Structure formats: C-alpha cells, structure tokens
Image (cartoon, rainbow, N blue to C red):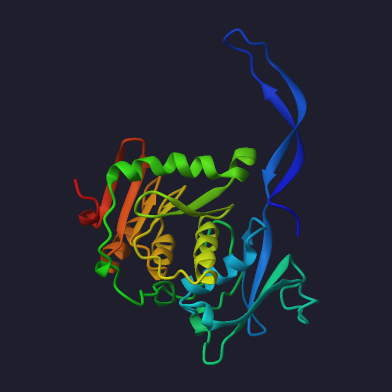
Amino acid sequence: MSGRTARRRVLRITLPGDGRPGGSAPRADFLAGEEPLGIRVDGAALTMTMRTPGDDLELAAGFLVSEAVIRSPADIAEIKLCDGTSCGHADHDGMGNIADVTLAAGVTVTPGARRNFLTTSACGICGKTGIEDICVLPHAPLAADPACFAPEMLATLPDRLRDAQRVFSRTGGLHAAGLFTAGGELIAIREDVGRHNAVDKVVGWALLEDRLPLAGCVLLVSGRASFELVQKAVLAGIPLLAAVSAPSSLAVDLAEEAGLTLVGFLRGPSMNVYTGAHRLPA
C-alpha cells in the first residue's frame, strides 16, 4: 500500500497578463492517492472500493454499518488488513489491499449487501441490484434526538473543517467528513477521494471506539449531500448532516422520513435548512 499522497512531475503553464510574463516550467506536484481496497466478510468478497489509502479498517467497519450489517463492535469477531495471499484467498484478483472481517456468531450479511462490481470513489451504492437494496431504514427514529444546534455555531464549521484537512492542503483533491459536538468541538475528521469513504471512515472510527449511536452530533461533509450520505448519517444515529453544497431530492425525502436535520449550502453566514428546522432555533 502506498501513502495518502503521490508525488508527480507536472508542467506548470502561466499565461501572460496583468503585468506578469507568461511561460512554462516543470515542477513537482502532490496528488491524492487512490487505490482499490477489497472488503471481505467471513471469507467471501463483499465489495471492492476505490479509496485514499489510510484508515482502511475504519472504512471497512463504517461500510458495514452503512449496509446495516453491524451495529456495535461486538458484531465483529476480528478485523484485519492483509493482501489476498496472506489472508489465504485470492478472490479480489490481487488488486490493492484486503480488509478481512470475521463477523460474530449470529451476524450475517444480507444478499442485497453484496456488490456485483467495483465501487468507485464517486459512488457508494454502485453494484446494488434494486432500489429496495439501496434504502436501508434506520434502527431507531432520529426524531427522538432532542439536540439543538445554534446556526452561529454551524456557520463556523466549514472553516474549521478546512483548517483540519492536512492532506487537502497538499493536494487540493480530497473530500472530508468532520464529526462535531453540538457545541462545535471537532471530534474526528477523515479525508478521502470519495465522499462516502470519508463518511464511512468517520462512522467506522466511532464504531471501533464504541461510540455509536452518535446522538447529539453534527456531521459536516465537504461536497454535496447525496441519498447515500443521508443514509449513512441516519444509520450512525447522527441527528444533523450539513454540506457545503446542495442536497439531492431523494436525500431530502429520506432525511424528512428519518427525522434528520439536513442543512445545505453551508457557506459563510448563510445556509439552507431542508428538513428538521426545529433543531436550529432562531
């Protein structure tokens, strides 16, 4: 496995204008790493996802939470990182690393959770066979979470998230997911080329730390709020999901149904509250 970044040579071209001369020159540049990770459960391939290397066990654990396979650390008997041969299998064609998960007795994977092909860094639900496989309902309604969040606090979070993105500052090519308390304290941040991977890493961290459900917390994502990110937040027990960009219509529908507060276009002093406005008292 290589690192979170890769160094490459590029040709930097500058056009003339505003009193500056034009020209070109070679220079070094840092790119966000992207490699495949296979997730295997009880000896059988579950999926393969394209991700930024690092926090891979958290990614695998969070993915299993978002698929409603596991709910607590007790549902995992063992989780380890290996390659196909060292795990004694070669069912991922030797690509990348393998997160090998052994479930506790009585915990099983539903047929709909297994993917038919590679999951890209842009798609967290690729390979699902039907809409009934995509929609996984929450274990408990989020409407019961009494947490409230000050809009003034929410407005400060995007800058705090950006300041904590160490790899983004070097590459400019990563999404981030940050978990905050209701008072605005940053609890955890993870970066990845995929929005859904960054969220899975945060949720996986919380699972392995035995902190699920994440009642009273805010999840902030650096891109848009898609259906899959809403579902991941709901299954992790997070009452408020905020995004710096727009939500989709299906994301808003699911948030409304689950009792999730969904905030979009969180930029500077303004934001759009699509669902659950009662958690943001004026």
Q: Residue at x 36, y 74 (%)?
A: 138
Q: Residue furthest right?
A: 85
Q: In the rendered image of this protein, does residue 234 appear above or below residue 122?
A: below
Give the tally of numbered discs: 0
Position above or below: 32 against 200? above
- Name the image quarter holding the N terminus: bottom right
Residue 209 visible in image:
yes
Which residue is pictured at 59% across the width and 52% down the height? 193
Residue in the foreground of this view, choosing between 247 and 141: 141
User: At x 29% / y 72%, what residue is drawn?
Assistant: 141
Residue 22, image x, y percentages: 68, 15
In the picture provided, is 269 more to the left or to the right than 36? Answer: left
Which of these two is toward me, 20 or 101?
101
Image spot of residue 9 (x, y percent): 78, 36
Left or right placement of residue 235 versus residue 118 in this view: left
- At horizontal 40% and vertical 54% (from top left) the residue drawn is 225
Q: Residue furthest top?
A: 19
Q: Which of the 4 image quadrants contains residue 260?
A: bottom left
